[in-house]
Amino acid sequence: MNYLSHYYFDKDENNKYFNVGLILPDLARSHIAKLRINPYKNITFTTKEISSMNDGCNKHFASDRKFHNWMTFVELTNKATDMIRESGDKDINRDYFITHIMVEILLDKILLDKNPSLADDFYAMIDSVEMDWILKFMRYAGLQDDELWKGQHRRFMKASFLKSYTSIENVIAAVEGVCANLGMIELNDEQRNLLIEICETIEPELARSIDALEIQLL
């Protein structure tokens, strides 16, 4: 799942440290490409803040496993991939990866459509967590440069790009951004329009399945 989905489905209204933990695994990759958070299941942390962040991270990994095994996700990702291949376009490389990311970001868009304040709440939650606690936790993941993290974090918060997930065009732009970061080929207008058409095709079924996903994630 993507940022907003993790926050929407799993947040704890009374624990901001748990909530930031929900998105730290993705935030770590976004801020510093080679930085990875691993599940710390067998470690007892002495402070509630660090322990809550760890619980949130573990929930992130558990929810991702459930989501990726969710039949609707598998079916829609396969359907989107088939549509790319049936179009005859052989220049879209790693098409299954692209559709995987596209379905995840499309889910964020659907949730934002239903809950217009979701992105604002998300960024406010992150901003409410003291940076010192985030840095302390990230050092367990191998963070060595606090200033680098803080600089990347300021850019992430200033960009607030999740607020733009209000149209399918912006969903595809976000997919393109992920691909660009991985050095994949840039989409041309025809390919971009193809992905927009695919999103328009699969969005209604994904939107109808939100309640089923909530059950899947229990």
Image: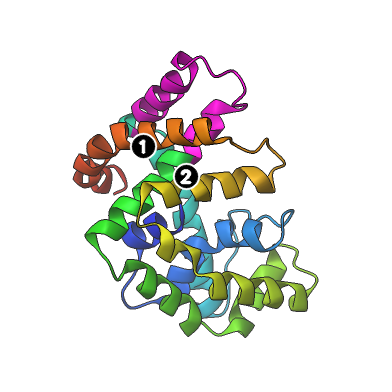
Q: Is residue 63 visible?
A: no
Q: Determine whether the residue tagged by mark 2 lies in a helix, strand or loop.
A: helix
Up/down of 88 relative to 51, above or below: above
Q: Nearer the viewer, residue 142 or 105?
A: 105
Point out the stretch of residues depicted in magenta: 73-101
Task: Choose top left, top right, bottom left or bottom right for residue 150.
Answer: bottom right
Residue 23 spot, x, y in % from top left: 50, 62
Secondary structure predominantly adopted by residues drawn in magenta: helix
Residue 190, above or below 130: above
Neighbour tally class for label 2: few under 14, some 14-19, many 20 plus, Cα within 10 Å:
many
| Disc 2: which residue | 172
What residue sits 39% from the left and 28% below the top?
A: 74
| Magenta run includes residue 88 | yes
Q: Residue furthest right?
A: 144
Kind of residue at disc 1: Cys
Q: Residue furthest front?
A: 189
For residue 199, the mark is: 1
Question: Image check: 213 left or right of 163?
Answer: left
* Residue 169 part of the magenta segment: no
Q: CA distance from mark 1 to mark 2?
A: 9 Å
**In the rendered image, which quarter is residue 97 located in?**
top right
Q: Residue 156 location in percent, x, y?
A: 58, 69
